Structures are given as C-alpha cells and as structure tokens.
Amino acid sequence: MESILKGKHIVLGITGGIAAYKSVTLLRLLIKAGAEVQVVITPSGKEFITPVTLAALSGKPVVSEFFTANTGEWHSHVDLGLWADLMVIAPATASTIGKMANGIADNMLVTTYLSAKEHVMIAPAMDLDMMAHPSTTRNLATLASYGVEIIEPAAGELASHLVGKGRMEEPEKIFERIESYFSRQCDMQGKRVAITAGPTFEKLDPVRFIGNYSTGKMGFALAEECAERGAEVTLICGPVSLEISHPNIRRINVESAREMLEASKEPFSKADIGIFSAAVADYRPEMRADSKIKREGVDDMTLHLVKNPDIAATLAADKREDQKFVGFALETDHEHDNAVKKLTKKNLDMVVLNSLNDKGAGFGTDTNKITIIRRDGTETTFPLKSKREVARDIIDGLIR
C-alpha cells in the first residue's frame, strides 16, 4: 500500500541539542515513505550532526545559512515556506522555541518558520529543569496558540543523567504523528460544518450591553481544525477581535442572540456537523433605550429581562438522523449532572464539558480542559491542552 507521505514536501528543522542524532532516523523514515525532505539546520545543530550525513540521506544539500559562503547563492526562506506541505522541528531546543514564540529571526530555521504557510510541528528536547521553567512553558503555550503542534517530550534519563521529562519523543512516534496529520487533512472532505462562537451582546442602550467574557477562541480553533481537514465551514460569531483567513471558512458576524439564531438556521439545516460553542446570553432587556440612559436624578434602576431563544435546542429539534450536533457546557457547580441534562434536553449527540473551577479552562485562556460526554453514555476526559489541540480531540471524537 502506498504511503500517504509519498510526494509530500517536508521541511525538517534540526537544532543544537544532543537529540539531533535521532533526527537521522526520522529523516530515513520520511525518505523511505516517499516524502521529499529539505533539511534546515541551525549553526549549533551542525556541532552535533554533520550536514554531509543529512545531505546523503535526503538527497538534497542541507540549508543552514542565508548565503552559500563560496558562491553567494541566496537561500530563500520564503520559497521554502511556500514549498513545504509540513514543517517539523526535531529536536526543538529551548532557545529555538523562545525565538519562534517571539519572532526572533536570526537564523535560517526561524525565518523559514515565520514564512511557513502550512502546519508546523515541534518536538522539544532539553533538560527537565529547562523544560519546567516558566519561560519555556509560556513560550510553548504561545506557539500552541499560534497553531503549532507540540509533540510532548517523554520522561526518562536525560543527557545530564537526571531523570525526568525532557527527552525528545522517539523518531518512530514523531513519524506516526506526521502520518496522522496527513491522514486528517482529507477525513472531512466534502463535509459541511456550522459553528457558533463567541459571546452575544444584548443592548441596554446605544452605549451599554449585557454580555459575557467569551473571546471565541475555542470556536475559532474548531473552525480552523475542520477547515484544515477539508470541511466547508460556516462560522457564526458574536462580537470578537479574532481574525480568520482560511479559504474554507465563511464567517457571519452577529451581535445578539436573536441575530445568531436567524443567521444559524440555514447553515445548520444544511450541515453534516453542527457545533454550538458560542456563549449565548440567556436573557435580554425587555426594553432597549434609544438614547444613553443617564444616572442624574436616578438613585436606583430596575432592569426587566426576558428569556432569549435557546439556539442549540431550537436548531437541534429538527436535527436529521444523518446530522451530528455538539454542544458545550461551561459549568461552575454540579458540572457533570448539568452537562448530561443538556445532552438529552437539547437533542445533542455530544456535549463538551469544561469547568471554571479548572485552572486554565474557560473564557479568555489559550488552553482548555474538557470531558466529552456522548449520547451512548461513554465519556473521555482529557488533560489541560491548547485550544487547538482540544479542537482536534473534539473532532477526532466526533468523526471516528
């Protein structure tokens, strides 16, 4: 059977760490699978493994500097970024991770990363204390928020002879992740997906509104994940500051809950998959003032609120048998019971439960910690991950 990697263009980045020797095995696996690999190595990486070895295995000259010293030939990081179907940096040292996270483009590898149009994976490798340092964890979280896939290091004996987390994942495991990435690219081909995201704002007057802290990050991560896997996505989002540019995503901007419901009716009726990730206001003011409400001469003010339509329940009531609908349950107490009630009450196939009691989960963060609860009674709990990784877990659980 022909490998899914056959003919794929992969940039393999190698940095200056002792784990660079493992990159040779990874390179051999990629070449054997039929991939075309361009190695880009940092100057310090050449202290651990020679370009001659890498060039012999890849069949291509290794790129390290912006110019070839003898001929002055220019190596274009822009062309490399456009050429690649995937960029993998293994090993990724703390130094390179820091440069990537902060845009410090002082070598060929980081400039190629900054020019990359396709997916990027990194396999960190360093001593356990460096791995656990707040600056490293912050930089990794930043890269994850950019959509970089982090291949977590393993625990074991390190080059320092200490034992802990920091060993670069084995080449065979990295190779499996690469295969999995290309397999995912087409597993939603031809599917239509509708997603709600962000908050809704319910106006009191032209200046004030009732809203919530949702930033839309989870919904946007889901939209990008589905689009990258080949789906046609309609994203109906409330007022957020996020931008999205994938050609497979059609964005509809709304403000209120009623506007979101109206904008969602057609996309959800045609969708194969519907995901309700928006934080919709449960209530709205019964009356909206046409001009700014003044406080002068008024000591107390009473607001009369009326219920907003339940978007998930309304649209899922007409769900076809061939459709799958997913809801979110952000809870503060009785989390599991409330999520199960939502699953059955709203005719959903799956509910994604997250709790504000979990550090790093909820509104405004780049991470989330979820439990997936399915209609058949099965559940899967995941550790704290970047929202892009969480989106991947949700979609994997939905279509596989």
Image: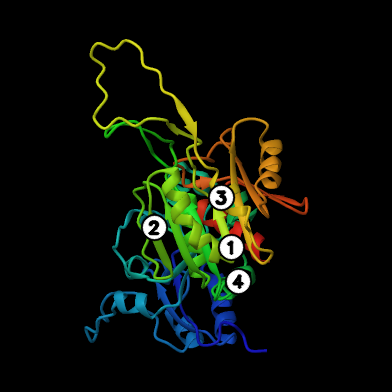
Tell me: residue 102, above or below residue 279. Answer: below
Amino acid type, callout 3: Lys
Name the quadrant containing residue 302.
Answer: top left
Q: Disc 1 on helix, strand or loop?
A: strand
Q: Quadrant of the C terminus?
A: bottom right
Q: Nearer the viewer, mark 2 or mark 3?
A: 2
Q: Disc 3 on helix, strand or loop?
A: strand
Query: Within 10 angstroms of label 2, few (less than 14), some, or many (20 or more) residues?
Result: some
Q: Which residue is label 4 attached to?
A: 180
Query: Within 10 angstroms of label 4, few (less than 14), some, or many (20 or more) residues?
Result: few
Query: Within 10 angstroms of label 3, few (less than 14), some, or many (20 or more) residues?
Result: some
Q: Which badge, 2 or 3, is on the more N-terminal residue?
A: 2
Tell me: residue 62, above or below residue 262. Answer: below
Q: Which residue is label 3 attached to?
A: 385
Instruction: Kindly check if marks 1 and 4 are in contact, taking CB atoms under 8 A apart as contact.
Output: no
Q: Which badge, 3 or 4, is on the more N-terminal residue?
A: 4
Residue 181 seen in the current view? yes
Query: Within 10 angstroms of label 1, few (less than 14), some, or many (20 or more) residues?
Result: many
Amino acid type, callout 1: Ile
Q: Distance between the Cα atoms at labels 2 and 3?
A: 28 Å
At x 54%, y 71%, the residue is: 21
Q: Which residue is label 1 attached to?
A: 273
Q: Distance between the Cα atoms at labels 3 and 4?
A: 18 Å
At x 49%, y 62%, the residue is: 267
Q: Disc 2 on helix, strand or loop?
A: strand
Residue 89 seen in the current view? no
Amino acid type, callout 4: Ser
Q: Disc 4 on helix, strand or loop?
A: helix
Q: Which residue is label 2 attached to?
A: 252
Q: Quadrant of the N terminus?
A: bottom right
